[in-house]
Image: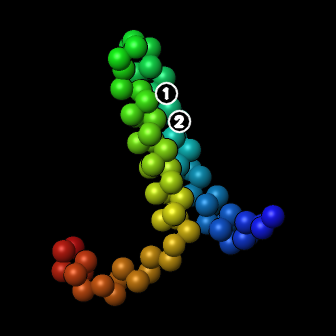
Amino acid sequence: MARFPSFLWSSLLAEWPLILPALALSLLGLLTMHTFGADSLAPRQALWIALGVVVYAVLSVMDLRFLRRTPVLITAF
């Protein structure tokens, strides 16, 4: 079994003050939505929360310094 590289762990855990409150609020909202009844949107919301966490994890381990040198983004800014 392959080990998860330590630099990936450090980059994922470095931003826990950012992701932890957002995830807690999202899960509380999901719990509130689930109590609305059988036809609630809670399963769809859970899917979007999971997708958001995956996107956050992928972007947090990527080196995004190349965006500083991208002329299109500089022009849009």
Q: Position of residue 12 (x, y in %)?
A: 61, 60
Is 1 displayed left or right of 60 in the figure? right
Q: Position of residue 31 (x, y in %)?
A: 48, 23
Residue shown at the point (68%, 72%) measured from the top left: 7
Residue with the most extreme left position: 75
Residue shown at the point (48%, 57%) measured from the top left: 56
Q: Position of residue 46 (x, y in %)?
A: 46, 35
On the image, which quarter does residue 45 sit in? top left
Q: Position of residue 2 (x, y in %)?
A: 78, 67
Q: Secondary structure at mark 2?
A: helix
Above or below: residue 61 compared with residue 19: below
User: Which quadrant does the N terminus fall into?
Assistant: bottom right
- Residue underneath mark 1: 28
Q: Count all numbered tags in the image, as a single digit.
A: 2
Mark 2 vs 1: CB contact within 8 A: yes
- Residue underneath mark 2: 24
